[in-house]
Amino acid sequence: MVNKVADEPQLLSKKAGCNTHGQDSSYFLGWEEYEKNPFDAITNPSGIIQMGLAENQLSFDLVEEWLEKNPDALGLRRGAASVFRELALFQDYHGLPAFKNALARFMSEQRDYKVAFDPSNIVLTAGATSANEALMFCLADQGDAFLIPTPYYPGFDRDLKWRTGAEIVPVHCTSANGFRVTRSALDDAYRRAQKRRLRVKGVLITNPSNPLGTAVPRADLEMIVDFVAAKGIHLVSDEIYSGTAFSEPGFVSVLEVLAARAPLATEFALDDRVHVVYSLSKDLGLPGFRVGAIYSSNPAVVSAATKMSSFGLVSSQTQYLLAALLGDKDFTRRYLAENKRRIKERHDQLVDGLKEIGIACLESNAGLFCWVNMSHLMHTRSFEGEMTLWKKVVFDVGLNISPGSSCHCSEPGWFRVCFANMSAKTLDVAMQRLGEFVQTSSCKAAPAALRRAAGPARSMSCPLAMNMKWALRLTPSFADRKAER
């Protein structure tokens, strides 16, 4: 009898059967556990609270209010006339001019009009994931490498490498200087790439940083620009969190740095080698709309990326709706200011709550998350210790957070904790759970005499995992610590 299951993999391509997607990372496994047992204040109060998803749900009411006042946008009407048939027909890959014009203006507004965007240099994609992958296809061949400062967004292992065959060489940053990238770290990564016989095609940064929640300082951007100029390589700046910078010194786009250093940009043709990725997923909180963009002044990149965008276009009705939304200058002005205020308020709530229970964060000024130092709660200062602590937080405490090892952090004990995808009350519940866990852990670590003197420790109010066994497939390992040196 033929073993059908055993024979099935032979019917698939090597790409379909390979294990380089990154889905086995703890970053994604935490999501899986949350989806099995999601928290709900009424129906499942002991469920897992999702703190591993960087979604912005803080300003939905502002968008909803605009939609109520502008029914034609959702009703696919222009005045009294329907535009349904116009939008239902095949659209050019370049996108609707009205939307690209509105998006270009919105991106400029976010940067206080210090940078002007030419709509003809914008390539629309189905989210930032598609934008980053398309850029890799445009700039790198299979086996070529991009340097990325650590810690970095875990999804890059999928977005940049899985289908393109490109390689990532980490630029190791440390807590000694707040994880800021240095010239020596870039030079070290470049040398390691050469030792591996990899051709370095560029540097990719996230600004503001995911997972650090920090806007890259102007001086650091200038240093990175100098580095790529000296090496004759590309620079990709993923700026999808540009509208979340809520305090000084604020967000500075790499394009602003280029504009201020025009002679250098001209001498080294940097305008052709610096590219920006953007989306509406974080600033407007619309990841489900799948709206991303590549901005490049390189005509060849724009041409190639436009052809590639045919595999992931933004729907016409989405473009029509957002052209009207982003074209309303009064709305975007009020939205950007209020959204930043709300992000800061929720950020401060998380930071203050963690501080009260003895947990510190990296000082941050942007993003939808904090970079949290929980190394003092680990039994051993190692990546095995980090994974053990992570599993306790997920299963015993009921909080899905992202371990630093999934972000390729070079130091164990750091975690990304998101705060903008839940209500203030849910965040309070999360802090209460974590506080009780910290207290319980501290009591267990204390000498027996001190424990007797202090009295019995409080039991956890969350019964979630006191009776739950850890998943066997999540045993401690170095699965997230890939060969980086």
Image (cartoon, rainbow, N blue to C red):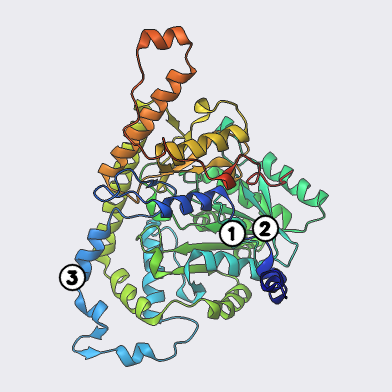
Residue 110 or residue 342, whichever sits in front: 342
The CA distance from mark 1 to mark 2 is: 7 Å
Amino acid type of disc 3? Glu
Give residue 285's quadrant in the image: bottom left
User: Which residue is labeled 2 in the image?
Assistant: 202
> Which label sits in the foreground, 3 or 1?
3
Give residue 71's quadrant in the image: bottom left
Which numbered disc covers residue 236? 1
User: Which residue is labeled 3 in the image?
Assistant: 68
Mark 1 / mark 2, whichever is N-terminal: 2
Quadrant where the image shows the N terminus: bottom right
Cβ–Cβ below 8 Å for labels 1 and 2? yes
User: What residue lies at 42% left-to-right and 53% top-to-bottom?
Assistant: 36
Residue 365 point in image, percent of width and height: 41, 42
Quadrant where the image shows the C terminus: top right
Q: Residues within 10 Å of mark 2 (few under 14, many from 20)?
A: many
- Secondary structure of the residue carrying numbered label 2: strand
Amino acid type of disc 1? Val
Give residue 316's quadrant in the image: bottom left
Q: Residues within 10 Å of mark 3 (few under 14, many from 20)?
A: few
